[in-house]
Amino acid sequence: MKSLVLTLMMILSLGTLSAQTTEGQLTYKMEFSSDNPQMAAAIPMMQGSTMQLYFMKDKSAADVTMGSFMKMKSVMDTKADKGIVLVEVMGQKIANNIESISKKKVDKDKIGKPVATSETKKILGFNCKKYVIKDPEGKGDDSVLWVTTDIKTTLAGQEQFSNGIEGVPLEFSTMQQGMNVRFEATNFDKTVSPAIFNLTIPEGYKVMTEEEMAQMGG
């Protein structure tokens, strides 16, 4: 179970309408698959999982509900250069303060290099282009992303979008330790509440470093 928690944290802690969109919220459904028996056994617990992505100028928030198993919220404010991550898992509430988004390092060697293709399609009315990110370990676990630049925002600090591609992925898949997760945007709402981007850690959360959070997985 601990290895599954770490895997999910790695997955989650991985910028056409009539005018370009600068604020709103996107709803993504999440689908899981795995050839690993241990990981596959956990998939029923994660049915109905969703991600909400909120954005406005200089701010973003991703709110993930992983079935009844895990909740995670990350809020980033690039103007203030700060962020927070909140996680509820296995009866625990933990939080991480990100003191500087701009200084947060991304290991590009582990992400892989994105390669643009000539394929395009529309998702929720937004023009999207297909990208493929080759598995840097050469295991064939390539990631596929459909990205729109019709949405103008910053997703800096949002780990699941740290792929070096300009724009917002509306459909993408990722593989981590034998678990494949596919995200697909199913709804767009042009309204968003500023309260979503509150950087105050709620009461009841234990503040931990990023390293301490990672160690929870064993």
Image (cartoon, rainbow, N blue to C red):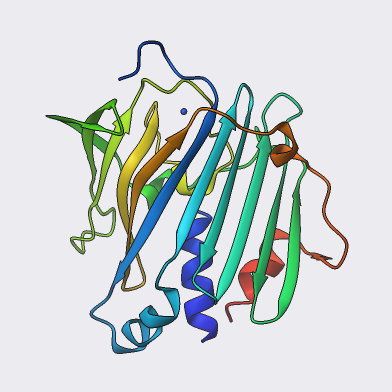
The correct choice, above or below, for 167 with respect to 82 in the image is: above
Q: Choose top left, top right, bottom left or bottom right for residue 120.
A: top left
| Residue sticking out furthest to the top | 19
Count of numbered marks: 0
Q: Choose top left, top right, bottom left or bottom right for residue 139.
A: bottom left
| Residue sticking out furthest to the right | 203
> Residue at coordinates 33% horizontally, 27% vertically from top-left?
148
> Residue at coordinates 31% horizontally, 33% vertically from top-left?
124
In the picture, measured across the screen, residue 215 lies left or right of residue 123, that is: right
The correct choice, above or below, for 183 with respect to 194 in the image is: below
> Residue at coordinates 55% horizontally, 25% vertically from top-left?
23
In the picture, measured across the screen, residue 82 lies left or right of residue 215, that is: right
Q: Quadrant of the C terminus?
A: bottom right
Q: Position of residue 185 (x, y in %)?
A: 36, 44
| Residue sticking out furthest to the left | 118
Viewer-proximal residue among 106 and 9: 9
Q: Position of residue 73 (x, y in %)?
A: 63, 54
Viewer-proximal residue among 200 and 143: 200
The correct choice, above or below, for 8 with respect to 156 in the image is: below
> Residue at coordinates 18% horizontally, 60% vertically from top-left?
140
Q: Position of residue 62 (x, y in %)?
A: 57, 47
In the picture, measured across the screen, residue 129 lies left or right of residue 63, that is: left
Q: Position of residue 187 (x, y in %)?
A: 40, 41
